[in-house]
Image: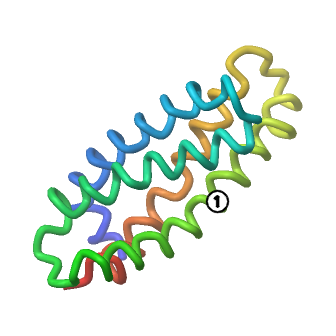
Amino acid sequence: MIRHFLSRQFLVFLLTGGIAAAVNFGSRIVYDRWLSFSSAVVLAYLTGMVTAFVLARLFVFRDSRRPAHQAAGFFVLVNLVAVAQTWAVSLLMLEVVLPRAGVERFVPEIAHAVGVIVPVFTSYLGHKKWSFSS
């Protein structure tokens, strides 16, 4: 299991995932102008997910023989689990953890950042085993 997370492929996954996470994070700030925090987190996650799929297909899982439409289907399934993780952790941080810790500044940003980081490992394994299996 550990070897998966020590590979070049995982490092490229982290890099492309970091780009997708930045798209996710930045778009949440934009969406926040018109939507509730909860809705903005979900929509931002979807924006980041499209970015992540394209980058993963091009740069991380290049050896995948799975047709794009099948890979996209599995990618969505793996990310449905991840978006639930992101949403739940973001709200838990926003409504419970950060207030109890006395954090008063940048609370939505911190909450969302932690929510985005949590599913990195489970997503990598899911995409490697299902979305882009070779």
User: Which amino acid type corresponds to the residue marked 1 in the rendered image?
Assistant: Gln
Q: Name the foreground residue: 80 vs 107.
A: 80
Secondary element at image label 1: helix
Q: Residue at x 63, y 49 (%)?
A: 42
> What is the count of numbered marks?
1
Colour approach in the figure = rainbow
Q: Residue at x 26, y 56 (%)?
A: 54
- Please, is residue 60 above or below residue 98 in the view? below
Residue 103 position in % (x across, y down)? 78, 21
Does the image show residue 8?
A: no
Toward the front, the furthest residue is: 34
Reply above or below: 134 against 10: below
Give the percent coordinates (x, y) of residue 76: 46, 70
- Can you name the residue that lies furthest to the top here? 105
Q: Position of residue 107 (x, y in %)?
A: 72, 25
Crowding near the residue tagged with mark 1, few <14, some 14–19, many ≥20 C-alpha atoms within 10 Å: some
For label 1, the residue is: 85
From this view, report whether residue 126 is shown above or below residue 52: below
